Amino acid sequence: MAAVQVAGSLLGGPPRETPREPPLEQGSGFRRLSSRLCALRPDDSSSGRTEIHLLFDQLISENYSEGSGVAPEDVSALLVQACRLVPLNQNHLVSKLCQLIHHLLNTLQVIVDEQNLDFLLAYAISAIQQCSSWTHMQILQALAALVYCNGSKCQKYLPDLLGKGGILMKLSDLAQSDPEVRRAAVHCMANLCLSVPGQPYLEEPYQNICFQAFLTTLQAPKSSAMDDITFCMLLQNSLKGIQSLLNGGKMKLTQTDELGALLAVLKKSMFHGLPGLNIEMPTVLYPTPLPQYDGLPPTKPQQSESSSSRPTVNKKKKSKVKPKKIQQGEEEEEEESSGEREVAPVSGSGRRNLHKGDAQCAPSQGGQSLPLAASGAAGKDRVSSPFSPSSWKRVSSSESDYSDAEGGMQSKVRSYQAKVRQGALACFLSTIKSIEKKVLYGYWSAFVPDTPELGSPQSSLMTLTLKDPSPKTRACALQVLSAILEGSKQFLSVAEDTSDHRRAFTPFSVMVASSIKELHRCLLLALVAESSSQTLTQIIKCLANLVSNSPYNRLKLSLLTKVWNQIKPYIRHKDVNVRVSSLTLLGAIVSTHAPLPEVQLLLQQPCSSGLSNSSSSTLHFSPPDWWKKAPAGPFLEEASVNTPKGSSEPCWLIRLCISIVVLPKEDSCSGSDAGSAGGSTYEPFPMRLEAFSNLPSDRQILCITMLLGLNDSKNRLVKAATSRALGVYVLFPCLRQDVIFVADTANAILMSLQDKSLNVRAKAAWSLGNLTDTLIVNMETPDPSFQEEFSGLLLLKMLQSAIEASKDKDKVKSNAVRALGNLLHFLQPSHIEKPRFAEIIEEAIQALISTILIEAAMKVRWNACYAVGNVFKNPALPLGTAPWTSQAYNALTSVVTSCKNFKVRIRSAAALSIPGKREHYGSVDQYAQIWNALVTALQKSEDTTDFLEFKYCASLRTQICQALLHLLSVASASDLSCIKETLELNGDMVQSYILQFLKSGTERDDTGAPPSPQERDQMVRTALEHISSVQALAGDTSKRAIMGFLEDILTVYFDSSGSQVALLGLTSR
């Protein structure tokens, strides 16, 4: 045949090809077997059972490759038919059927629809009740696959599964003799607790039942009948179940005993199987009372450290100096958007797959995780979180992953033990997210070291960071520590270490200072010893969090110097994420409050100081003088302005930052991201305004064209970075008035808002918020051409997209509502008059109102209040007469009086003071409701038990006082009686706070610069002048009473300030 083909080619004719069999259509094997199964009828004969057995075996052995073309509804229909063919008295067939259910749902990643789920669940529950006990393991595996992500659809069967005497409760009990059955039952419960966004949560009574079952499992010791791997899988399932309850189920841990018991088992599990450590933990950890919480006694008496928060550590042997840690099995995983389920890539010696029926399988939907890399990292260098959903999903597809060469069974046990530690840390992170920081810091000493113990850290998170052989576990521990340190400034502010304390007891302030010093010591030790780039990134980010929150002005010198000198070499590390986090840490050091003399000295160090001291053999640096070369152009002059005194050249850190922005990227320095440019040198997109505006026009056009083109990339990391870059570009003054560019950018962003990746949608929503900010800036220019030329149809599309985005996750929602507020502010009368805009305006405002009222993240609610304030600024909207007016005011008054977050209250009070005319406030009753709500909010402005909110009390009172004075300055005659009634009841309180507002004002807050003293007393004068001009109703004494109230305020204020001239002017008037 080859000869014939060659001859044909030589003669010039087309070569004759060898006849080939047509390729098999994807899923054809499944469909053929499914047709045969559906053609069968129930048959209790021996031949019938044999045929069903053979069909089941063929279906199980069929090769289901990725994208096999099998529809989920076909799988569900086949399983229902299979159940109809298998009577419950045939144990072997039932067992084989359950293997088929588990295999198909797992391999094809099918979530059964509600109708078929109802039938299959009833069958599985009946099978457990009627079949022999040896089949229970297979039935439970099938049940776990069925309820996976279907917990909200199983309500009818929850009493049978989780009720008193329920199947899962019996089989997961400590008395269960078969350890595999017990593990499978706990796994079913964990899958039941796994919620899907947009679906109802598991009902609270069942949440508590599951939580107690998981907690009991974690507290119980390993039974003699259970092997190490089964025990590890049992612990993993329990941890996964608790994490699902905390994440998706929004379970709140309000009881001290409940939280203390969970933290105790989490700490015990954090060290499970860690070589050289044997932790003995109490059943419950109790919090330490903190001096920051005045008047809040602990709910439990403080335990002695030996019996409460401090575990006993039995060291089996002295720790020796370990060789450099080897990165075995470390995976580089791409970031996953929430809710997506993917088959993991090949890694190591075996393929990693998703096993819903396995103990470690189910992803933690909505799992809490902290970003591992800055937004600048993209492509294959993106470092994934150890707590991403994939960390639960990616498990070995078979035991063949553990070969004799890898240590056999011991290696396998160590791998499972590491997964338990990682699962415990993931669950701990979710716990941190679900409780208030003031509660968390009561357990600080149980997880954060304060003194070295015989030259090594205590059994704390730092123990894992320094001693755990798994780089992934070390990264997990560091993420948890970062979450604890985030927002800890108020707690750490009490630290005091400026003088020696020789007392009979150690003050709390000294203990906190000691803890800060120990964290510095341990993290710097970890920095030197670490070889994994992913973990190294976490160490540096953790240091940045520590530096940002530590009160160095109250601590002894040298802490920052040690960090500074050790981090400098890492700014040229081969890994881009390490470089980015190193710069973040240097920025945190420079940003420490007060400016510290220690930092000023560090900035004046010679440029080469510290760069030659490479502390790790794994670091790959360019020559230390790579950044000494001064960049061309005006940047050098700008840098010289900020040079520390006494220095003959610009500060080395300023030169470094400038060179990163403007110099071309060098191949020798690109490190792990060299491949992203194909090995060639290229100029980065200028992300700074000064850099962009100095580019020639052809280069500016090139940048814009490339960005708009990259927005169509199929790589979601590229697309996310592009969306964010467009959001930066649209703010540049040289671009924001270009209608065509703004319109092109808007269309690109709207397309990204439809992407399946949450990361892309979040970046697109942020950019949409920026773009709408640009619309508002352009409104304020004298030239109206931009508003006239901007497409009304595009505005309509933007409104529709922003409304849809406001229903998305909080990361998207927070910027979507910001965009809605700006768009409604931007609308011109010509738009509002059109009928097609009326419905969309109503829908947009309803979206804002519902966002204010829902239990969302505080950032989301703050942005929603800000957006409603923007809506009030548009004079073309029918504020005061439209039906949505009262709904908007009701939402704002509800928040200003009851929201636990004071920044949200401040923003809602600011929004209530925006309408400029009395008619905008609606009816007399509506005005009275707003007035009374603000007075109530002023009265409750100090009612908080969260010390983190106290610092916003003064700002809240200032904003409320401004709103009250504004309402007085627009009041009508009909409103005066309501105002008078309120002042008769609460006049003294209101007067005292307005006087305080006049005398002291407040610091700048998120509503802008505070008014000056002259502006403050002018507000009172304006209100007084307006009230005096109101034509009061006959016989109404309210006007005189209100004027007297305001005059008394001014009299007291001017008298106390000694302004006799102003006082005389007031009296004569």
Image: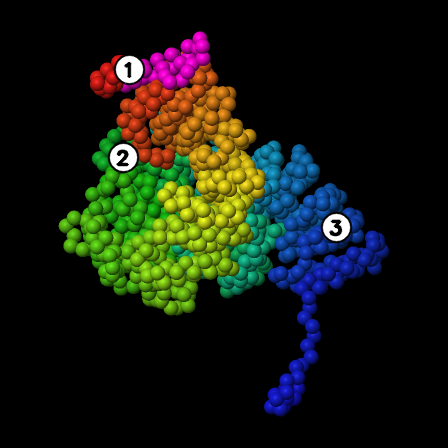
Identify the main secondary structure in magenta: helix
Question: Of the numbered discs in the image, which one, if any, rests on residue 1069?
Answer: 1
What residue range appears in magenta?
1028-1053
Disc 2 residue crowd, few under 14, some 14–19, many 20+, Cα 10 Å: many
The three-letter amino acid code for the residue at tag 2 is Glu
Question: Of the numbered discs in the image, which one, if any, rests on residue 710?
Answer: none
In the image, residue 232 sits, relative to residue 1039, either above or below, namely below
Give the labeled residue for mark 2: 496
- State left or right for residue 125 relative to residue 366: right
Q: Residue at x 37, y 36 (%)?
A: 1006
Q: Earlier in the sequence, mark 1 or mark 3?
A: 3
The residue closer to the viewer here, 133 or 267, is 267
Residue 898: where, in percent of width, then height?
A: 47, 27
Residue 317: where, in percent of width, then height?
A: 39, 50
- The answer to whether residue 637 is seen in the rendering is yes
Q: Residue furthest top?
A: 1035
